[in-house]
Amino acid sequence: MSTNAYDRPAEALRSGDKPVTAPPSAGAKKLGGVAGWVDDRLGPAKGVNYLMKKVFPDHWSFMLGEIAMYSMIVCLLTGVFLTFWFIPSAGHTTYDGSYVPLQGVGMSEAYASSLKISFDIKGGLLIRQMHHWAALMFIVALSAHMLRVFFTGAFRRPRELNWVIGCILSMLALVEGFAGYSLPDDLLSGTGLRAAEGFMQSAPIIGSYLAYMVFDGPFPGEAIIPRLYGVHVLLLPAILVGLFTAHIVMVAVQKHTQYPGPGRTNSNVVGFPVMPVYAAKAGGFFFIVFGFIAVLSALVQINAIWVYGPYDTSAVTAGAQPDWYMGFADGALRLLPGWLEFHAFGYTLSLNVAIGALMLIPIMYGIMAAYPFIEAWVTGDKREHHLLDRPRNQPTRTALGVAALTFYGVLMFAAANDIMAIKLHMSINDITYFFRTAAFVLPVIAFWATRRVCLSLQRADRNKVLHGRETGRIVRTADGQFFEAHEPLDPYTRWKLVGFEGQQPLELTSGVDAHGVAAPSNGKWRTRLSRFYFQDVVQPVTPAELEAAHHDGHATEHLEAGETTKALH
Amino acid sequence: MNALAARRRHPAAIFLLLLLGLILTGGAYAALAPKPAIAAEASAGQVKEGQELFKTNCATCHGANALGTNVGPNLAGVGAAAVDFQMGTGRMPMAEPGVQAPRGKEVQFSEEQIAAIGAFVASLAPGPAVPAEEYTTGAGGDPGKGGEIFRTNCSMCHNSAGAGGALTRGKYAPKLTGVEGKHIYEALLTGPQSMPVFNDDNISPESKNDLIAYLKAMEAEGNPGGMALGSLGPVPEGLVAWVFGLGVLVGAAYWLGQKGA
């Protein structure tokens, strides 16, 4: 407060005022130079400051999504390079480039320009291979990221919407990949497009119209390559980048989840700030991913289009598979029996094709996107969760995930039945019969086995908490008794094993609450599902139990985890 | 009116004209028809030697007179080319029973012995002979044209890279890399095991030569992109991405996660 403030009597009225403080961004303005100039005009300092101070928890499994993000960036960069020379046209031309075995062969301009990129543009082959390897790694990494999110329960409230966005991103990535490898118009991609045309035709009633609409007439026509090009370089990348941005912004807004541990609660995030730790780590990781993809592309050949030759509707190649991420749909087609094709009233219903080619992907992604809501309904758990689950602490969810993964794996491996037949010297028929059976049997076995393994791990955790670590040291007492010395766990280790919530299945409610007021009943089915979900549930060790175990010493040795659970019920 | 014109209505004229036409057509066919490429004629001594070798090495399955048993097919009419292919690639004598005779690790007989057995089998009934070298090396052939023939006729079983492919019930189309041009030609000619016959009317000797030229040119080009992963396409590529790619990058993520602030 200044001392000469009383020149006019009225000023005295404001003698209690606090002096005007500088605006919060003054510190940033003091930066001066370019940063200050920009902040004066656009004012980003506050937002940047917020982002730079944002804390992220540290765990390798949180970086799987980063691998996907960086692979996508590599795809975008290399893709721009490829557009400089690629000609998206089915126009006819004769090859006169430097690859001898194809000289003088008639082909489309799309194929000829892909060959030109591969053989006559400096660095073209490397960039083409980087584009393809980065695309494979993008979908590999996003799938691994998705599995991490699923098995740790990171999709629970409030992150259900981000999970749904992730599902859409994953599905669009498949379509984007398919559009991309169909562009060079080589024999393999042409075969893939021919198959895609068949899939469209298998749609009941609208099939042939749909195929004619997409291909602008009968197969192959001249329209499909330019159309796919527009979808591949413009439409889908725009949607992917848009959804991906929303995905990341939601992570920032909702904060990152963290694994349970000492000091980590549902309302804090323990980790390092972006600046300087994560900026360095993530920036460095980008270059690791970029460098790795470049080395892989320099050493390992991918999609050798010159070997396949130009597409010709009369030709086909053995070992025609799609890229791995479409493998499960191809596998479903290979497993579906031919008798699923029906004829009635002069119409054909090709369920042998439609189930695998048209219905599988929407159904699979539909179930995936709906899972968070289904689980919340079954468990009745509508609370916010920022602490992740250890997969063993949710035996039924983990088992369901492994069962679904097993089913997916069976379909994916079935797409390689011919490769297995020649490499393992087996009959392709026997392999196919095995996979047909496995598609139904293995998921059930996987579910049961996974749930048992999870429950056993949880019981082992309980034992360890109650009785300590087995030291392998045998002690003889003065009166000749032998026992193995158990070492109590330190509190940090113990926290990991007990720091989860106890769970109870929903009870069938009568439809009225304690005061006799009508309340919605849980319903028979919901209660049954909930009981199934929490079957044999193992509760965390309570402080009282731990206390009892420590006091009674050997007296509680006989108390098995299963009995404890029953006692709690 | 000259003498020829005066006799044009002679009763014999029509027959003379027909005769002339037939001679011309026949002569032109003999001159222009696709000729089978034949390496050498067999001598009587060779046939005799071949028969002896056949009795001791092949008769167990194919029968003493090469007319077949229930474990080996009749060889009358398969020709010397079939013998040269089957024995020259080590497929015969077959090491063990199976759905298909695999290519042998080593050839069991000398070239002379194989030629002798071939001469004996060829003497049973006419069949395709061992082709002359003119069309079997790919020299002077057009690889571009050969590639088109290959993709239309061969790649659906042998794979567009010639890496081989699966057939039903454990049978397979073998890989075509590292196979002698002569044996490719003979396989086309005789259709061994599950393979169809592509005779000289179907694919001419020149086109067969183009085909061999294509396969040799592909081999000569190698793999400009790096390791080819068995030339088996997207399956091994996906395997590399999952196992090697994800493995290395997760390893890097783990390493970064271990590094403190």
Image (cartoon, rainbow, N blue to C red):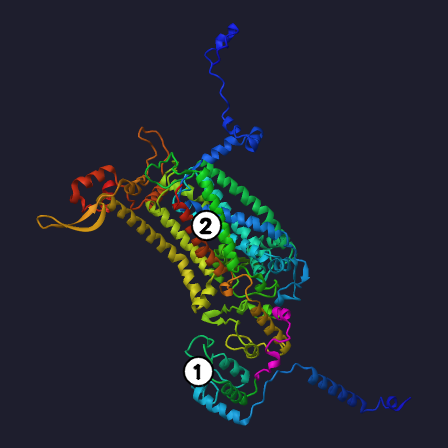
Distance between mark 1 and mark 2 Cα atoms: 54 Å
Q: Give, as a single range, the part of the protein colored magenta.
A: B128-148
Residue drawn 60% across the image and 81% down it = B133
The front one of A444 and A513 is A444
Query: Do the residues marked 1 and 2 share a common chain?
Result: no
One can see residue B34 in this view: yes
Location of residue A566 in the rendering, given as x and y in whole percent from the top left corner: 24, 43
Q: Residues within 10 Å of mark 1 (few under 14, many from 20)?
A: few
Query: Type of residue at label 1?
Result: Asn
Q: In the rendered structure, does residue B144 fall within the stretch colored magenta? A: yes
Residue at the disc numbered 2: A143
Tell me the subunit letter for badge 1.
B
Where residue A190 sits, quadrant-wise, is bottom right
Residue at the disc numbered 1: B70
Q: From what the image shows, is residue A199 above or below residue A15?
A: below
Residue drawn 33% across the image and 31% down it = A513
The front one of A212 and A451 is A451
Judging from the image, what secondary structure is the residue with disc 1 in?
loop
